[in-house]
Image (cartoon, rainbow, N blue to C red):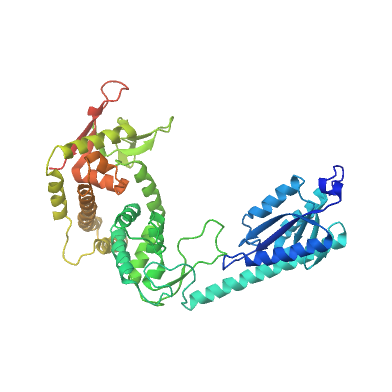
Amino acid sequence: MKANTDKPRPGHQTGTVRAALYVRISSDREGAGLGVARQEEDCRALCGRLGWQVADVYPDNDVSAYSGKKRPEWDRLNADISDGLVDAIACWHVDRLTRSPRELEDVIDLHDQHGIQLATCTGEIDLSTPTGRFIARALGAAARHEAEHKAERQRRQLRQAAQTGSPHGGQRGYGYTPDRTEVIEAEASVIREFARRALAGEPLNEMAHDLNARGIPTSTGRAWSRSALKLVLISARISGRREYRPTDSYEPGHKPLLGEITATGCWPAIISVEESDRLRALLTAPERTKYARRSRRYLLSGIFACGRCGTHMVGREHYETGRPRYICQREASRPGCGRITVFTDLADTEARDRILTVLEHSPGMLDRLLAKHQAHTTGPAGEDPATVLREIDEQRDELAATWAAGEITRKEWATAKRVLDDRAAKISGRINRTAQARALAQFAALDGDMWQSWEHPSMTSSAHRALIRACVTRIVVQPASNGSRWDPDRIQPDWIA
């Protein structure tokens, strides 16, 4: 590409070369910027020997050129060159500019387009000559080769450490001392409690709110979020196992949640391996993410029932306006009439007001509901609902295999499956009533009127849903009787006796 000499640059008119000092270090472990400070000192001395005037310093501290991530100061330097504010670049070595041959060609283009000169503390490079360009490209290729070999060595060291069960670096993992040799019992008890609750089907966002309401911080002293709690519960670390996520096995920004188990029994376990595996499978299931997103948006999906056919209504967006609504859907898997719809903002508000009004004007109703639900939450002594449900699923699979092998008739299979389904339904009911009893107790403990308590930060969407479930068997949505105008009387709760 021909150099741009038609428009003289301001620095060239005065004979003064305005130099940009570009300094970069990939890893600043101390955070003091000492590496870039040393580079800046050497580059200033270089400019002094060349008679260049230092225009500005562009420090990309603790930023890798090999990773391909954005370098803010490098981008600022390029913008200043385009604006005619810089005539030359001084750096400690070519590999401080880039470790990518592709980006090095961009540096050469800067000379061709803007007449930019380049000088390094390790030797002068004349980009205006073929030999100078060859030297720059050779140095850039060597830097890239070293960076790739360094990354390969680091990956191998990390995998070897994982295979031997050595703890990885980084911040302290919740539940353990920094060296991971001892369990912090106060935090371990929190992990055990919330592992049981997660296996029982309780939503992560509700549990995170519970932790924050109880004043329990993370290992870094911050508030809990849904994702932070999830990362703790799906980590193989809490079962005493070492986990490895190879850095070259995924695209940037798509780091997998689960890694490869490379060693077991590496340190004291907080929960069992079996519990850990079930948590990892449960909390990373794709359908769980879809359900969580849908349930947050449609608070009363499955609670509203069609006033014509009795089918539970589901949340869907209006096909033209996109406005959320509940509909009695008619499809193969859902035999609804398809004739009842109601917009979510109107219906949710009316259902909430109906329930809170009854609770406010019925003294003792909250206590009676709480006692009723608590009486139905206890199962046989020593029974873990999540374990029993998993065993029932395994029995269903064995039953299906037995029928497929011709060892039992279809009638025998259906009879046995009905028994297992009924047992699973009873256990799931106890799990749901546990969540409802917790929401009732949480709501009753809040100060203020019913509407203030409803808006309290601890009352999550899951708590709202559980509270409504604790009060009604369903909420019937009757057909509209006056055209398009909203009629609050369409909302009719069926109260729990």
As drawn, is 68 to the left or to the right of 407?
right
Work out which quarter of the rendered image holds the C terminus and state it.
Answer: top left
Dividing the picture into quadrants, the one containing residue 212 is bottom left
- Taking depth in this image into account, of 64 and 355 the one nearest to the observer is 64
Q: How many numbered dots are placed on residues in this image?
A: 0
Q: Position of residue 130 (x, y in %)?
A: 87, 60
Residue 202 seen in the figure:
no
Residue 123 seen in the figure:
yes
- The residue depicted at 71 percent of the width and 60 percent of the height is 97
Q: Position of residue 394 (x, y in %)?
A: 29, 63
**In the picture shown, does residue 258 fall above or below 360?**
below
- Taking depth in this image into account, of 447 and 247 the one nearest to the observer is 447
Q: Position of residue 276 (x, y in %)?
A: 36, 67
As drawn, is 17 to the left or to the right of 28?
right
> Which residue reaches farthest top?
482
Dividing the picture into quadrants, the one containing residue 127 is bottom right
As drawn, is 462 to the left or to the right of 40?
left
Q: Position of residue 275 (x, y in %)?
A: 33, 67
- The residue depicted at 13 percent of the width and 51 percent of the height is 371
- Taking depth in this image into account, of 446 and 288 the one nearest to the observer is 446
Dividing the picture into quadrants, the one containing residue 379 is bottom left
